[in-house]
Image (spheres, rainbow, N blue to C red):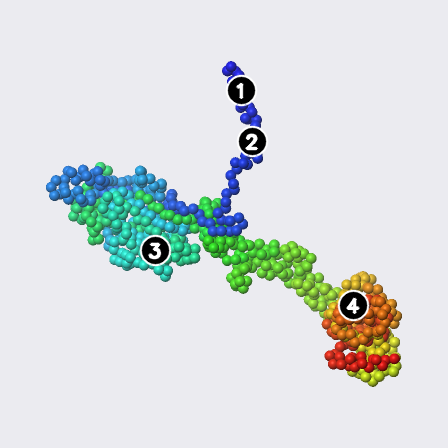
Amino acid sequence: MQRRAMLFLLTLVAISVSAKPNDAYLKMFAMPPAEDPCYDYDKARLCIPDFVNAAYEAPVVASSTCGAQQPQRYCEYQDHQTRATTATTATGSAGSGSSSANELQCHSCEANNFPPRALTDLNNSNNVTCWRSAPIAPGGSGGGGDNVTLTLSLGKKYELTYVSLQFCPRAPRPDSLVIYKSSDFGQSWQPFQYYSSQCRRLFGRPSRTTVTKHNEQEPRCSDAHRHPGHDGNGGLASRIAFSTLDGRPSARDLDSSSVLQDWVTATDIRIVFHRLQQPDPQALLAIEAPADLRTGKYSVQLGGNTIETHSHLAAAAGLHYAVSDFTVGGRCKCNGHASKCSPDASGQLSCECRHNTAGRDCERCKPFHFDRPWGRATARDANECKMCNCNNHSRQCRFSMEIFRVSQGISGGMCLNCRHSTTGRNCDQCKEGFYRDPKKPLNHRKVCKACECHPIGSSGKVCNNTSGQCPCKDGVTGLTCNRCARGYQQSRSHIAPCIKQPPRMINMLDTQNTAPEPSESTGSVGVNRGASSSAAAQSQYYHTVGGRECEKCKISTKRLNLNKYCKRDYAIMAKVIGRDTSSEVANSERRRAMDPDVDYEMDQQPREQEYGSRSATGSSSVPDYPNDSETARYDLQIQAVFKRSKSSAYGMPNTMLKRGPMTWIIPIKNLECRCPKIKVNRSYLILGRDLEAPPGYLGIGPRSIVIEWKDDWYRRMKRFQRRARTCA
């Protein structure tokens, strides 16, 4: 039976050892992730460290310690039991007087009996540890011989709420003391609070002072510590507690008061004891001194507080200062940007900074987060430091208050040492000698390309940092100044690589067709600029600026009379509102590809702003139109129709002529020869024949008339309409 039980137990152990826990099952008991006190999801918020006793285990330096150099005698009040025994043994009036009087009981002290570290250790009421000073030296209130200091180093900046001193039981109480604070690790000291029964006499301050917003950073003097305590001694209070914000008007809104923030900030606290409660000098004379400090005991009666003291008698009686607990309540100063303080790599206590802040107190923004000024976190605004926007071209920046104000509080960061050939406040521009590549995003490391200005055609090596256009010499064009402009030809000079072409014949403007047609009447629209020169009239060909050989222009651009009006199928007034150049660009590229080795080639493509400003002759007399690559399309807005033909053939212009948009097709060679000269956003008077236009469009041919419109022509066109009824 026992064997079966043993086998059963062994089987259960083996199963439990071999079994593996289920991850899904364990996740059911997993703790939820801890909430970040400095962030509400992704939004920064105010966070502060826990409230602590900043003095706990902190080092304290005392200017005087009982028995530090040699054994010394100290005296303290008798406890209740000893006092009761003394009262019963007393006789007569002397006995009744001693029962109501305070008595001293003296002891001896040696080194390390009452060290300063007892001030900041764990305070246990059942096992009270005390620091005691050496008996006060002669000098009293007049010479300052009874001044004793305690200096507490917190090791870091704290925002203090209170400073508390717990005196040792039965020990004499100080009549006057001052609490000082330092915010620079002991380099300078500022009074925090005064305590005295004689505030005006010792410190020159009234015992009751009203604090306003104008003097919130001033210390006050108080005699509240003289109220009787609870130790039964009938003397001064057993504890002094100083509240740093008590009675300060801005205490409820500490985040918005920089004065109070500095007031409560401290790295060190110093207590200076100025004067003890002195016993009755006549009673001190009853002490037989000197005596054996190790075994002797002394008992002396104390009177009330006496300002005029006899310090040599007090020293002989062993009167001293004694404190059992030194407490400083506050929070580690992190300016609202951390919820915890911990030792850093060097062992110093520092804030665990959040909100992109840095420093032992989170008092600055961490590197590359200077797009807005540093600020203390508040309940309304966490003042999170923001990263500078340098488009991945720099990792250094600085804050500029001027730029921050100009941007109305949006951004104030200025990037430093921009890389990848960039410059500017946000490294968003290309530096001199480079230009922006429009095909790459702004944060690309190759967004700026070096200027490739031609060494001969350009007048400098610095191009426009946006468009990349190089500064070209006279007669040179192109993005990199690598070809001659229209009307210029290449030379062999490096100084003037392109020279102007000399015209072969007289300019076309003087050879336009102004001769009257047969049976032309005298009425006309326009101004007769005189007859053309005989040389131009007899010449069959001439050269334009572009170098194209153009025939005599047959499109009339100067004169109009009733005879011409009658012989045209339509007459309209239209405004040129745009030009479609998509087919022209493709044709120009094909022509340019035919001779790729020429550095300075003629720019045959007309400039966009002129839209066919060059005139030419050579428009075909046949109605067949060139293909799309050889024609230009203009968008017209017909504003008035003065004449339509009676033909009803489908697709002829007269069947579609009405107010509204219309497409006007002109051969490119006519535009290059400036026949006619067309400009965008100008209105023209257009007369033509139906057969000269492709189906569905408005065209141009040898019999077309194109004249730039003038407002005073409207009445003349109406007159032509009336007289056209007599046309044959």
Mark 3 crowdedness (10 Å alpha carbons): few <14, some 14-19, many ≥20: few
Which label belongs to residue 359?
A: none
Q: Inspect this view and state whether residue 504 appears.
A: no
First of labels 4, 1 by sequence position: 1
Spot occupied by residue 390 in the image (x, y as percentages of width and height): 59, 56
Which label belongs to residue 8?
A: 1
Q: Which residue lies under the disc numbered 3?
A: 247
* SS label for mark 3: loop
Q: Which residue lies under the disc numbered 4?
A: 663
Spot occupied by residue 405 in the image (x, y as percentages of width and height): 52, 63
First of labels 1, 3 by sequence position: 1
Judge whether 163 appears above or below 654 on screen: above
First of labels 2, 4 by sequence position: 2
- Disc 1/disc 3 C-alpha distance (Å): 77 Å
252 displayed left or right of 489: left
First of labels 2, 3 by sequence position: 2
Q: Which residue lies under the disc numbered 2?
A: 21
